[in-house]
Amino acid sequence: MMISYLSHLTSFTMPERYQLAAQSQRGFTLLEMVLVLFLIGLLASAGLLFTEGVEDQAKYDETKRRMELIRKAIIGDSTRTINGAPEISGFAADMGRLPGCIKELLVNKNCDGSEIEDWEVDPDTGIGFGWRGPYIQTIADRSGDVKFRDGYGNDDDTENFGWEWLLLDASNNTLSMTEAQSAVKANLQSLGFDVIDPVDDIPNGEIEAISNLIAQNDWLTDDGLTISFYNTSSLSSVDIELDNWDLSLSRSDIPEFINLSVATAVSSVTVQPESSVDVTANFENKIPMGIYLLTLNCNPSSTCPSSVTTPYQIVLLPKHHIAPFPWRISP
Protein backbone atom coordinates (compact mmCIF):
# COMPACT_ATOMS: atom_id res chain seq x y z
CA MET A 1 0.00 0.00 0.00
CA MET A 2 2.80 2.41 0.94
CA ILE A 3 4.61 1.60 -2.30
CA SER A 4 1.45 2.34 -4.27
CA TYR A 5 1.06 5.79 -2.52
CA LEU A 6 4.66 6.74 -3.20
CA SER A 7 4.27 5.72 -6.81
CA HIS A 8 1.21 8.00 -7.01
CA LEU A 9 3.24 11.01 -5.67
CA THR A 10 6.09 10.42 -8.06
CA SER A 11 3.66 10.55 -10.94
CA PHE A 12 3.29 14.36 -10.33
CA THR A 13 5.75 16.87 -11.71
CA MET A 14 7.60 19.20 -9.26
CA PRO A 15 5.27 22.26 -9.79
CA GLU A 16 2.25 20.04 -9.32
CA ARG A 17 3.68 18.79 -6.01
CA TYR A 18 4.15 22.36 -4.69
CA GLN A 19 0.58 23.25 -5.71
CA LEU A 20 -0.77 20.19 -3.92
CA ALA A 21 1.15 21.10 -0.70
CA ALA A 22 -0.13 24.72 -0.82
CA GLN A 23 -3.72 23.55 -1.15
CA SER A 24 -3.36 21.23 1.85
CA GLN A 25 -2.00 24.13 4.10
CA ARG A 26 -4.58 26.83 3.14
CA GLY A 27 -5.31 29.48 5.97
CA PHE A 28 -8.46 31.42 6.96
CA THR A 29 -10.21 33.53 4.41
CA LEU A 30 -10.89 37.22 5.09
CA LEU A 31 -14.56 36.50 5.69
CA GLU A 32 -13.73 33.86 8.28
CA MET A 33 -11.39 36.27 10.07
CA VAL A 34 -14.05 38.98 10.18
CA LEU A 35 -16.58 36.52 11.55
CA VAL A 36 -14.20 35.35 14.30
CA LEU A 37 -13.38 38.93 15.32
CA PHE A 38 -17.08 39.78 15.40
CA LEU A 39 -17.81 36.86 17.72
CA ILE A 40 -14.91 37.78 20.01
CA GLY A 41 -16.14 41.39 20.20
CA LEU A 42 -19.68 40.23 20.92
CA LEU A 43 -18.51 38.02 23.78
CA ALA A 44 -16.33 40.83 25.17
CA SER A 45 -19.25 43.29 25.08
CA ALA A 46 -21.55 40.87 26.83
CA GLY A 47 -18.94 40.27 29.52
CA LEU A 48 -18.44 44.00 29.96
CA LEU A 49 -22.17 44.62 30.36
CA PHE A 50 -22.38 41.83 32.91
CA THR A 51 -19.41 43.17 34.87
CA GLU A 52 -20.82 46.71 34.79
CA GLY A 53 -24.10 45.50 36.28
CA VAL A 54 -22.27 43.71 39.08
CA GLU A 55 -20.19 46.80 39.83
CA ASP A 56 -23.26 49.06 39.95
CA GLN A 57 -25.00 46.64 42.31
CA ALA A 58 -21.93 46.54 44.56
CA LYS A 59 -21.87 50.36 44.76
CA TYR A 60 -25.58 50.44 45.56
CA ASP A 61 -25.20 47.81 48.29
CA GLU A 62 -22.22 49.68 49.77
CA THR A 63 -24.20 52.91 49.81
CA LYS A 64 -27.06 51.23 51.70
CA ARG A 65 -24.57 49.71 54.14
CA ARG A 66 -23.00 53.10 54.81
CA MET A 67 -26.40 54.68 55.37
CA GLU A 68 -27.07 52.09 58.06
CA LEU A 69 -23.67 52.83 59.63
CA ILE A 70 -24.59 56.53 59.80
CA ARG A 71 -27.92 55.66 61.41
CA LYS A 72 -26.28 53.46 64.06
CA ALA A 73 -23.61 56.11 64.67
CA ILE A 74 -26.39 58.53 65.63
CA ILE A 75 -28.87 56.42 67.60
CA GLY A 76 -26.79 53.36 68.44
CA ASP A 77 -27.63 49.71 67.84
CA SER A 78 -30.80 48.65 69.67
CA THR A 79 -29.93 44.96 69.20
CA ARG A 80 -26.85 45.22 71.42
CA THR A 81 -27.29 44.78 75.17
CA ILE A 82 -25.18 45.16 78.30
CA ASN A 83 -26.16 42.93 81.23
CA GLY A 84 -29.50 42.30 79.54
CA ALA A 85 -30.33 45.98 79.08
CA PRO A 86 -30.18 47.88 75.76
CA GLU A 87 -26.84 49.57 75.15
CA ILE A 88 -26.88 53.37 75.38
CA SER A 89 -24.63 54.66 72.62
CA GLY A 90 -24.48 56.98 69.65
CA PHE A 91 -24.14 60.70 68.98
CA ALA A 92 -27.73 61.51 70.01
CA ALA A 93 -27.40 59.80 73.40
CA ASP A 94 -24.07 61.51 74.10
CA MET A 95 -24.94 65.01 72.86
CA GLY A 96 -28.70 65.18 73.39
CA ARG A 97 -29.25 66.28 69.77
CA LEU A 98 -28.87 65.20 66.15
CA PRO A 99 -25.66 66.04 64.27
CA GLY A 100 -25.80 69.16 62.12
CA CYS A 101 -23.71 67.44 59.45
CA ILE A 102 -21.95 64.12 58.81
CA LYS A 103 -18.59 65.60 59.80
CA GLU A 104 -19.65 65.74 63.45
CA LEU A 105 -19.73 61.92 63.47
CA LEU A 106 -16.07 61.70 62.43
CA VAL A 107 -14.24 64.49 64.27
CA ASN A 108 -15.00 66.50 67.40
CA LYS A 109 -15.75 69.67 65.50
CA ASN A 110 -19.03 71.41 64.81
CA CYS A 111 -20.10 71.97 61.23
CA ASP A 112 -18.65 75.50 61.37
CA GLY A 113 -15.25 74.16 62.46
CA SER A 114 -15.50 75.09 66.15
CA GLU A 115 -14.67 72.53 68.82
CA ILE A 116 -17.29 70.21 70.33
CA GLU A 117 -17.08 69.58 74.06
CA ASP A 118 -15.34 66.25 74.68
CA TRP A 119 -16.91 63.53 76.81
CA GLU A 120 -16.79 64.42 80.50
CA VAL A 121 -18.33 62.77 83.55
CA ASP A 122 -19.97 65.24 85.89
CA PRO A 123 -18.57 64.68 89.41
CA ASP A 124 -21.88 65.64 91.04
CA THR A 125 -24.17 63.36 89.02
CA GLY A 126 -21.72 60.68 87.85
CA ILE A 127 -23.28 60.99 84.39
CA GLY A 128 -21.24 61.63 81.27
CA PHE A 129 -22.02 64.12 78.54
CA GLY A 130 -20.23 65.28 75.40
CA TRP A 131 -18.57 63.97 72.24
CA ARG A 132 -16.85 60.58 72.52
CA GLY A 133 -16.42 59.59 68.89
CA PRO A 134 -15.44 58.95 66.26
CA TYR A 135 -18.81 57.31 65.83
CA ILE A 136 -17.78 55.98 62.41
CA GLN A 137 -14.36 54.43 61.92
CA THR A 138 -12.81 55.40 58.58
CA ILE A 139 -9.34 55.91 57.11
CA ALA A 140 -8.05 59.40 56.32
CA ASP A 141 -7.33 60.41 52.72
CA ARG A 142 -3.81 61.03 51.46
CA SER A 143 -4.34 64.68 52.34
CA GLY A 144 -5.09 63.69 55.93
CA ASP A 145 -8.79 64.58 55.70
CA VAL A 146 -11.26 62.16 57.25
CA LYS A 147 -14.31 61.67 55.04
CA PHE A 148 -17.20 59.23 54.76
CA ARG A 149 -18.54 59.22 51.21
CA ASP A 150 -21.29 57.09 49.71
CA GLY A 151 -20.61 53.87 47.82
CA TYR A 152 -20.25 55.79 44.55
CA GLY A 153 -17.43 57.94 45.90
CA ASN A 154 -19.36 61.19 45.55
CA ASP A 155 -17.71 64.14 47.30
CA ASP A 156 -18.67 67.81 47.07
CA ASP A 157 -16.00 69.04 49.53
CA THR A 158 -18.63 70.00 52.13
CA GLU A 159 -19.23 68.86 55.71
CA ASN A 160 -21.50 66.10 54.32
CA PHE A 161 -18.96 64.64 51.83
CA GLY A 162 -21.41 64.39 48.93
CA TRP A 163 -24.37 63.09 50.97
CA GLU A 164 -27.60 65.08 51.12
CA TRP A 165 -28.33 65.62 54.84
CA LEU A 166 -31.59 67.32 55.83
CA LEU A 167 -32.66 68.27 59.36
CA LEU A 168 -36.38 68.69 60.15
CA ASP A 169 -38.39 69.89 63.13
CA ALA A 170 -41.62 68.30 64.41
CA SER A 171 -43.64 70.20 61.77
CA ASN A 172 -41.36 69.05 58.92
CA ASN A 173 -39.81 72.48 58.55
CA THR A 174 -36.31 72.40 57.11
CA LEU A 175 -33.54 73.46 59.50
CA SER A 176 -30.00 74.61 58.87
CA MET A 177 -26.99 72.81 60.32
CA THR A 178 -26.71 75.48 63.01
CA GLU A 179 -30.25 74.67 64.18
CA ALA A 180 -29.51 71.02 64.97
CA GLN A 181 -30.54 71.56 68.61
CA SER A 182 -34.14 71.98 67.40
CA ALA A 183 -34.14 69.04 64.96
CA VAL A 184 -36.16 65.95 65.81
CA LYS A 185 -35.66 63.97 62.58
CA ALA A 186 -33.30 63.79 59.64
CA ASN A 187 -33.23 62.53 56.06
CA LEU A 188 -30.21 61.15 54.22
CA GLN A 189 -29.82 60.68 50.48
CA SER A 190 -27.10 59.59 48.06
CA LEU A 191 -26.99 61.23 44.64
CA GLY A 192 -26.14 57.88 43.07
CA PHE A 193 -23.94 57.21 40.05
CA ASP A 194 -25.15 60.28 38.16
CA VAL A 195 -25.10 63.20 40.61
CA ILE A 196 -27.18 65.31 38.21
CA ASP A 197 -30.05 63.03 37.22
CA PRO A 198 -32.25 62.23 40.28
CA VAL A 199 -33.48 58.96 38.78
CA ASP A 200 -30.80 56.93 40.63
CA ASP A 201 -30.85 58.80 43.94
CA ILE A 202 -30.93 56.56 47.02
CA PRO A 203 -33.64 56.66 48.35
CA ASN A 204 -35.39 57.87 45.23
CA GLY A 205 -37.48 61.05 45.32
CA GLU A 206 -37.27 64.57 46.72
CA ILE A 207 -35.24 64.55 49.92
CA GLU A 208 -38.01 66.36 51.81
CA ALA A 209 -40.43 63.53 50.99
CA ILE A 210 -38.31 60.40 51.48
CA SER A 211 -38.49 58.21 54.57
CA ASN A 212 -36.66 59.55 57.61
CA LEU A 213 -33.30 57.99 58.32
CA ILE A 214 -33.82 59.17 61.91
CA ALA A 215 -37.43 59.54 63.09
CA GLN A 216 -38.67 61.12 66.34
CA ASN A 217 -39.40 57.79 67.99
CA ASP A 218 -35.91 56.52 67.19
CA TRP A 219 -34.24 58.71 69.80
CA LEU A 220 -36.87 60.80 71.65
CA THR A 221 -39.35 59.73 74.31
CA ASP A 222 -42.36 61.56 75.73
CA ASP A 223 -44.08 58.80 77.69
CA GLY A 224 -43.71 60.60 81.00
CA LEU A 225 -42.82 59.24 84.42
CA THR A 226 -44.72 57.77 87.35
CA ILE A 227 -43.62 58.72 90.85
CA SER A 228 -44.83 56.43 93.62
CA PHE A 229 -44.91 58.45 96.87
CA TYR A 230 -44.52 56.06 99.81
CA ASN A 231 -45.35 57.21 103.33
CA THR A 232 -42.83 55.64 105.71
CA SER A 233 -44.85 56.65 108.80
CA SER A 234 -47.05 54.05 110.46
CA LEU A 235 -49.14 56.65 112.29
CA SER A 236 -49.72 59.82 110.26
CA SER A 237 -50.90 60.51 106.75
CA VAL A 238 -49.05 62.95 104.52
CA ASP A 239 -50.66 65.66 102.42
CA ILE A 240 -48.71 66.58 99.31
CA GLU A 241 -49.35 69.79 97.44
CA LEU A 242 -47.83 68.79 94.14
CA ASP A 243 -47.76 72.38 92.93
CA ASN A 244 -44.90 72.88 95.39
CA TRP A 245 -42.84 70.03 93.96
CA ASP A 246 -40.34 70.28 91.16
CA LEU A 247 -39.28 67.15 89.33
CA SER A 248 -36.30 67.56 87.02
CA LEU A 249 -34.04 65.51 84.79
CA SER A 250 -30.43 66.54 84.49
CA ARG A 251 -27.19 65.22 83.07
CA SER A 252 -24.55 67.86 83.74
CA ASP A 253 -23.99 71.56 84.09
CA ILE A 254 -22.70 71.86 80.51
CA PRO A 255 -24.72 74.71 79.00
CA GLU A 256 -25.28 72.85 75.72
CA PHE A 257 -27.75 70.59 77.52
CA ILE A 258 -30.87 72.09 79.11
CA ASN A 259 -32.11 70.51 82.32
CA LEU A 260 -35.66 69.43 81.57
CA SER A 261 -38.50 69.84 84.02
CA VAL A 262 -41.55 67.61 84.30
CA ALA A 263 -45.04 68.97 84.80
CA THR A 264 -47.38 67.07 87.12
CA ALA A 265 -50.96 66.27 86.21
CA VAL A 266 -52.41 66.23 89.75
CA SER A 267 -52.55 69.20 92.12
CA SER A 268 -52.61 67.41 95.50
CA VAL A 269 -52.72 63.93 97.04
CA THR A 270 -52.99 62.38 100.51
CA VAL A 271 -50.79 59.40 101.31
CA GLN A 272 -52.03 57.16 104.12
CA PRO A 273 -49.60 55.58 106.63
CA GLU A 274 -47.37 52.90 105.14
CA SER A 275 -49.14 53.31 101.81
CA SER A 276 -48.22 54.72 98.43
CA VAL A 277 -49.87 56.91 95.82
CA ASP A 278 -48.79 56.98 92.19
CA VAL A 279 -48.60 60.33 90.44
CA THR A 280 -48.07 60.52 86.68
CA ALA A 281 -45.90 63.34 85.41
CA ASN A 282 -45.78 64.28 81.75
CA PHE A 283 -42.73 65.64 79.98
CA GLU A 284 -42.94 69.25 78.92
CA ASN A 285 -40.58 68.37 76.06
CA LYS A 286 -39.56 65.24 74.22
CA ILE A 287 -36.53 63.82 76.00
CA PRO A 288 -33.46 62.51 74.14
CA MET A 289 -32.51 58.96 75.05
CA GLY A 290 -29.74 58.65 77.59
CA ILE A 291 -28.88 58.38 81.27
CA TYR A 292 -30.30 61.07 83.56
CA LEU A 293 -30.45 62.10 87.18
CA LEU A 294 -34.04 62.26 88.39
CA THR A 295 -34.51 64.68 91.27
CA LEU A 296 -37.70 65.55 93.14
CA ASN A 297 -37.62 68.63 95.34
CA CYS A 298 -40.27 70.43 97.36
CA ASN A 299 -40.16 74.20 97.41
CA PRO A 300 -39.72 75.59 100.93
CA SER A 301 -43.14 75.77 102.59
CA SER A 302 -44.90 74.48 105.68
CA THR A 303 -46.72 71.83 103.66
CA CYS A 304 -43.58 70.01 102.51
CA PRO A 305 -43.06 66.57 104.03
CA SER A 306 -39.58 65.23 104.57
CA SER A 307 -38.03 63.39 101.65
CA VAL A 308 -35.94 60.33 102.51
CA THR A 309 -35.02 59.30 98.98
CA THR A 310 -31.87 60.30 97.13
CA PRO A 311 -31.96 61.17 93.39
CA TYR A 312 -32.25 58.31 90.93
CA GLN A 313 -29.97 57.59 88.00
CA ILE A 314 -32.40 56.49 85.31
CA VAL A 315 -32.22 55.33 81.68
CA LEU A 316 -34.62 56.77 79.12
CA LEU A 317 -35.09 54.91 75.86
CA PRO A 318 -37.68 55.42 73.12
CA LYS A 319 -40.41 52.78 72.92
CA HIS A 320 -39.50 51.42 76.38
CA HIS A 321 -41.94 51.39 79.28
CA ILE A 322 -40.63 53.03 82.45
CA ALA A 323 -41.61 51.46 85.75
CA PRO A 324 -42.81 53.70 88.62
CA PHE A 325 -40.08 55.28 90.74
CA PRO A 326 -40.67 54.88 94.49
CA TRP A 327 -40.08 58.10 96.42
CA ARG A 328 -40.15 57.73 100.19
CA ILE A 329 -41.51 60.57 102.33
CA SER A 330 -42.40 61.09 105.97
CA PRO A 331 -44.52 63.68 107.87
Image (cartoon, grey):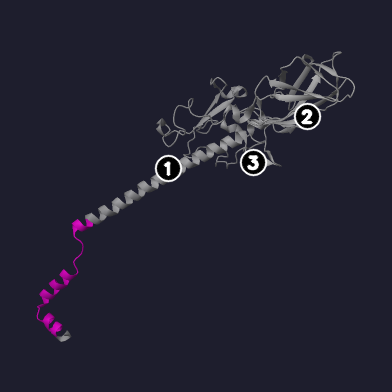
Q: Residue at x 32, y 49 (%)?
A: 45
Q: Secondary structure at mark 2?
A: strand
Residue 97 figure quarter: top right
Q: Which residues are magenta?
A: 4-33
Q: Quadrant location of the N terminus?
A: bottom left
Viewer can see residue 315: yes
Residue wearing tag 2: 312
Residue wearing tag 3: 80
Q: Which of the two residues, 84 or 120, is positioned nearer the viewer here?
A: 84
Q: Choose mark 3 or mark 1, whichever is in front.
A: 3
User: Is 26 part of what is drawn in magenta?
Assistant: yes
State which tag comes first along the sequence, 2 or 1: 1
User: Is 13 part of what is drawn in magenta?
Assistant: yes
Left or right: residue 28 versus residue 221 is left
Residue wearing tag 1: 56
State which tag comes first along the sequence, 2 or 3: 3
Q: Which of the two residues, 93 or 231, is positioned nearer the viewer here?
A: 231
Viewer can see residue 145: no
Residue 324 horizontal/vertical position (percent): 74, 28
Give the main secondary structure, helix, strand or loop, of the magenta stretch: helix
Task: Report if the CB atoms under discs 2 and 1 are less than 8 Å apart.
Answer: no
Q: Secondary structure at mark 3?
A: loop
